[in-house]
């Protein structure tokens, strides 16, 4: 395996608040890495730093696929191969399901509408939305919106897919289905995946490795089975936020 993403000394202050502190970790090609942390731990800020939406404090290194992306605007980072989904789905309203996915691929096949259309239809099949191409996005169920978000992110043919709380707001059946879908697209698209998630049980089954944050700082990294037993993680996350039974299941 080779390194796809490498972060070192990443800091972000918002005024007096040190939201991301000296974050250093790397992600290997093909891995599924989970970012775990209680509310306010700095997970979303980290995604915003990775995708160029905000700039880190001086001294940070963020290298993606051999390129230093610090200071690059979001569209250039996206063009290098980082796509993300959002905690709250943000479909383009007034457009159909198919059109939403096609828009996600613009910029990659700008000159070939037929290829974009074909790729979008194939992705909708992969994510289980075949037959809903013409459906207006507004009428999709929440679970289907999550699937659409993933198809739209994949339309850009990313190397790295960042998922922001993909299971939020879903019931247990939908979570299991979406988790299977993430596994399937990870394999089919040869992707590297980083996900933020609070649903500990499914998260721990899905990821190869976990980076645990608290108050903006990496407090532990390792295999899921080791992370759920790590004293700092239990104190920061499991002890505070998640009932013991869920932690036990995750282990
Ligand atoms: N633009 C901003 N300006 C000021 N403070 C911010 C800004 N964005 C985030 N913060 C603060 O930075 C800290 C980290 O927030 P962040 O949203 O990254 O955490 P999180 O781990 O994603 O939390 P959640 O799970 O609730 O989404 C919080 O204290 C938050 O209030």
Image: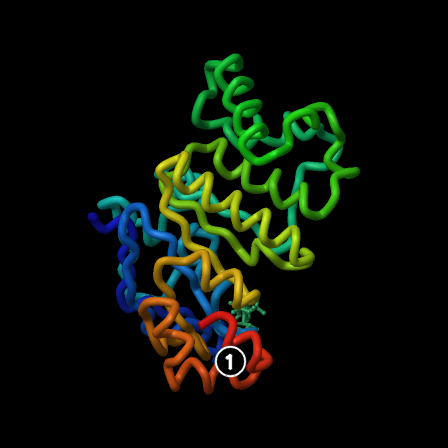
Can you identify the residue that label 1 sits on? Answer: 238
Say whether residue 23 is left or right of residue 140. left
Please give the name of the residue rendered at 41% of the width and 69% of the height, measured from the top-left corner.
Answer: 12
**As drawn, which residue projects farthest toward the right?**
139
In the rendered image of this protein, does residue 108 appear above or below residue 79?
Answer: above
Left or right of 93: which side holds 107?
left
Q: Residue 92: give x, y in percent of width and height.
A: 67, 37
Looking at the picture, how far across and down is residue 231, in whole percent? Answer: 39, 86
User: Under tag 1, what secondary structure?
Assistant: helix
What colour scheme has been applied to the protein in the rendered image?
rainbow
Q: Nearer the viewer, residue 162 or 206?
A: 206
Residue 27 is situated, as x and y percent measured from the top left of the image, at 30, 55
- Asked if residue 98 is positioned above or below residue 32 in the image, the reply reads above
Q: Residue at x 65, y 58 (%)?
A: 172
Q: Percent position (x, y) of residue 95?
A: 71, 29
Foreground residue among 180 and 156: 180
Between 23 and 27, which is closer to the camera in this rendering?
Answer: 27
Report crowding for label 1: few under 14, some 14 to 19, many 20 or more residues within 10 A (C-alpha).
many
Q: Does 63 appear above or below 197?
A: above
The quarter of the picture where the C terminus appears is bottom left
Picture quadrant of residue 8: bottom left
Residue at 53% x, 56% y: name it.
164
- Ligand 1 is found in the corner quadrant, namely bottom right
CB of mark 1 near ligand 1 (< 8 Å): no
Name the image quarter holding residue 222.
Answer: bottom left
Residue drawn at (25%, 45%), measured in percent from left and top? Answer: 67
């Amino acid at each position: 395996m080779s390194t796809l993403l490498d972060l070192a000394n990443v800091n972000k202050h918002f005024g007096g608040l040190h939201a991301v502190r000296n974050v250093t970790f790397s992600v290997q090609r093909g891995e599924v890495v989970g970012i775990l942390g209680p509310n306010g731990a700095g997970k979303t800020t980290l995604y915003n730093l990775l995708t160029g939406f905000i700039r880190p404090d001086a001294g940070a290194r963020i290298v993606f696929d051999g390129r230093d992306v610090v200071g690059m605007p979001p569209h250039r980072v996206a063009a290098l191969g980082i796509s993300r989904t959002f905690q709250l789905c943000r479909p383009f309203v007034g457009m159909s399901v198919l059109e939403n996915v096609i828009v996600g691929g613009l910029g990659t096949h700008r000159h070939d509408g037929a290829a974009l259309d074909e790729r979008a239809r194939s992705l909708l099949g992969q994510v289980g939305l075949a037959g809903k191409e013409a459906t207006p996005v507004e009428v999709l169920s929440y679970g289907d919106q999550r699937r659409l978000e993933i198809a739209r992110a994949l339309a850009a043919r990313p190397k790295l897919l960042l998922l922001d709380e993909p299971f939020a707001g879903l019931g247990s059946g939908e979570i299991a289905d979406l988790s299977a879908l993430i596994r399937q697209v990870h394999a089919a698209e040869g992707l590297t995946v980083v996900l933020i998630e609070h649903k500990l049980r499914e998260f721990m089954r899905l990821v190869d490795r976990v980076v645990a944050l608290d108050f903006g700082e990496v407090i532990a990294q390792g295999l899921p089975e080791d992370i759920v037993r790590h004293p700092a993680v239990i104190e920061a996350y499991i002890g505070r936020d998640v009932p013991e039974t869920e932690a036990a299941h995750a282990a």
